[in-house]
Image (cartoon, grey):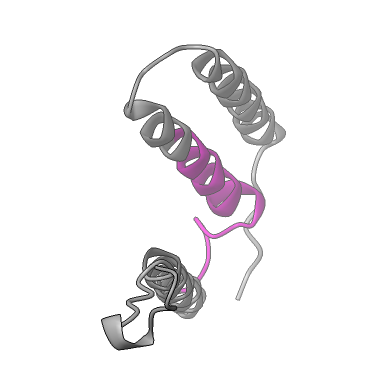
Amino acid sequence: MGQHFVPKRVYYSVFMALIALTGLTVWVSFMDLGAFNNVAAILIAATKALLVLMFFMHLKYGSKLTWAFVAAGFLFLAILLTLTMVDSLTRDWNVVPKAWSSPGD
């Protein structure tokens, strides 16, 4: 498998895009978007992560096996986050039967 050489201008362009997206993150953090604050922050962070994965980690020029391992990593991340959210959402489901309540209640 031959190496793929990327011109330096691509790296500089991606770096400038990352700096611009970081500035956008800071700007959005001072705005009141209501329920969309988290959505905007996650979309910007996902865009920055995608740029790093594609160019700095050379995923854009990788083989299908590399893509499969990256997809498997994101699948396990999704499973981990789902199980964590389910656990945290069910923390206050402490249902105490009436017979178990203390006499002072």
Q: Is residue 36 left or right of residue 72?
A: left
Q: What residue lies at 54% left-to-right and 43% top-to-bottom?
A: 51
The secondary structure making up most of the magenta span is helix
Q: Whole-percent x and y of residue 55?
A: 59, 47
Q: Nearer the viewer, residue 92 or 26?
A: 92
Chain part drawn in magenta: 44-63
Query: Where, by quadrant of the figure, is residue 30 drawn?
Result: top right
Quadrant housing residue 81: bottom left
Name, please, the residue furthest toward the bottom: 99
Q: Is residue 27 left or right of residue 15?
A: left
Which residue sits at x=50%, y=78%? 69
Let me know if residue 29 is in the magenta part. no
**Residue that appears at 34% across and 21% down:** 34
**Residue that appears at 61% across and 17% down:** 23
Above-or-below relation of 38 to 27: below
Quadrant (top left/top right/bottom left/bottom right) for the N terminus: bottom right
Q: Is residue 62 magenta?
A: yes
- Find the residue positioned furthest to the front: 104
Q: Relative to residue 27, is residue 103 depicted above or below?
A: below
Q: Position of residue 64 (x, y in %)?
A: 42, 75
Q: Quadrant of the C terminus?
A: bottom left
- In the displayed structure, would residue 85 be above or below residue 32? below
Q: Where is residue 53 shown, x and y percent of the image?
A: 57, 53
Task: Report the number of discs.
Answer: 0
The foreground one among 70 and 101 is 101
